[in-house]
Image (cartoon, rainbow, N blue to C red):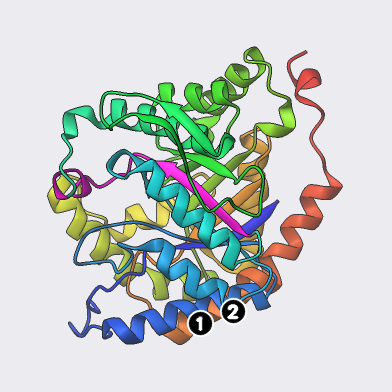
Amino acid sequence: MELGIDSFASSIPDPATGLNVPPVERMDQLLEEIELAERVGLDVFGVGEHHRVEFLDSAPTIILAAAAARTRKIRLTSAVTVLSAADPVRVFEEFATLDLISHGRAEIVAGRGSFVESYPLFGYRLEDYDDLFAEKLDLLLALRKNIQVRWSGKHRPALTGQAVYPRPVQDPLPIWVGVGGTPSSFERAGRLGLPLMVAIIGGPPARFRPLIDLYREAGRIAGHPPERLQVGLHSVGFLGESDQQAADDFLPGFTYTINQIGKERGWSPMSRARFEAERGPDGALLVGDPPTVAKKIVRVSQDLGGITRLTFQMGVATIPHETMLRSIRLLGTEVAPVVRDRLSSSKAPPRSEQRR
């Protein structure tokens, strides 16, 4: 299993003091976090896309390009690219360029986005949310396959054979589909034979098993080999030297962020009791000491029939920089080796046997 980190480049005031890290300093910290993630042996680092005051990631490919110049091995991905509100030609050009700069380490996780501010910002109607994504994903895949593209759709002017450059190092450039909980999104990813990145923010991860099975079955019916149907998870998580320390370090900022966003969406407030339940054995949060988190990752992978990648969202809240670096070190040096060893020594039987 690949393990990594996703960041939204949060720029949120400290809930205790009201103070905020200046954006220039916060960006320096983020690049240092990516460098450390590589040094401690993590496989991937992703940067999200938002167009809000709380986050500095409105131009993720620029952040990833800066990281590419300072790293050599770690894979660099979006988390996610809000494809519904973007021009697929520009997305492909930017990530192909990133692939050149990084010598073949770029990836796209394409999604519709959990926030909606990008739609009016770029002149799209929220009512076209899914139709935009389906059409633009079709174009993005066509651009990946061919230098010269003939394509037409409802939401963008047609391409009549224009060539799109540069071409990436990787052929094909990896494109994952980021999904939440909509069955049609899982089915579409499987039908297209694209790897799946599932965002699990709350509730028991095991509840996603029927949707992941739907993805795998759609891929099988479409004729895609099982090894193409990769499943990744994007999960909120944080590491400490003890379970209590991890919770105490992460809870204040996490609660503040969730409750601020929850006011917009009508969510019930995040309480300490709810937080503790979510970081328990059946909850979504991967917050604890290395043995606790490693054990939970292995269990989640088994519950979901095997996953190939898990990325920790550590940057959704305000965390002191040194505390964040400590968490990254623990993930790379103490969690990742244990998870890889346990999963490699207890391979699940082939899915054909599991269905018998």
Q: Position of residue 319 (x, y in %)?
A: 37, 77
Secondary structure beneath disc 1? Answer: helix
Residue plotted at (13% across, 50% down): 264
- Using the image, determine if residue 298 lies above or below residue 209: below
Whether residue 117 is situated above or below residue 127 in the rendered picture: below
Residue, x 42% and y 21% (percent of image)? Answer: 184
Using the image as rendered, state which of residue 274 and residue 170 is in the foreground. 170
Give the amino acid at mark 1.
Answer: Glu
Residues shaded magenta: 105-121
Question: In which quadrant will I find the C terminus?
Answer: top right
The correct choice, above or below, for 295 with respect to 45 in the image is above
Specify the amino acid type for callout 2: Leu
Left or right: residue 170 compared with residue 166: right
Question: What percent of the width, then of the height, locates residue 68?
Answer: 56, 71
Residues at discs 1 and 2 in contact (Cβ within 8 Å): yes
* Picture layout, residue 86 above or below residue 187: below
The answer to whether residue 221 is seen in the rendering is yes
Q: Residue at x 43, y 23 (%)?
A: 183
**Is residue 112 found inside the magenta-colored segment of the image?**
yes
- Whether residue 267 is in magenta: the answer is no
Q: Which residue carries the number 1 mark?
A: 32
**SS under mark 2:** helix
Is residue 202 shown to the viewer in this render? no
Residue receiving disc 2: 36
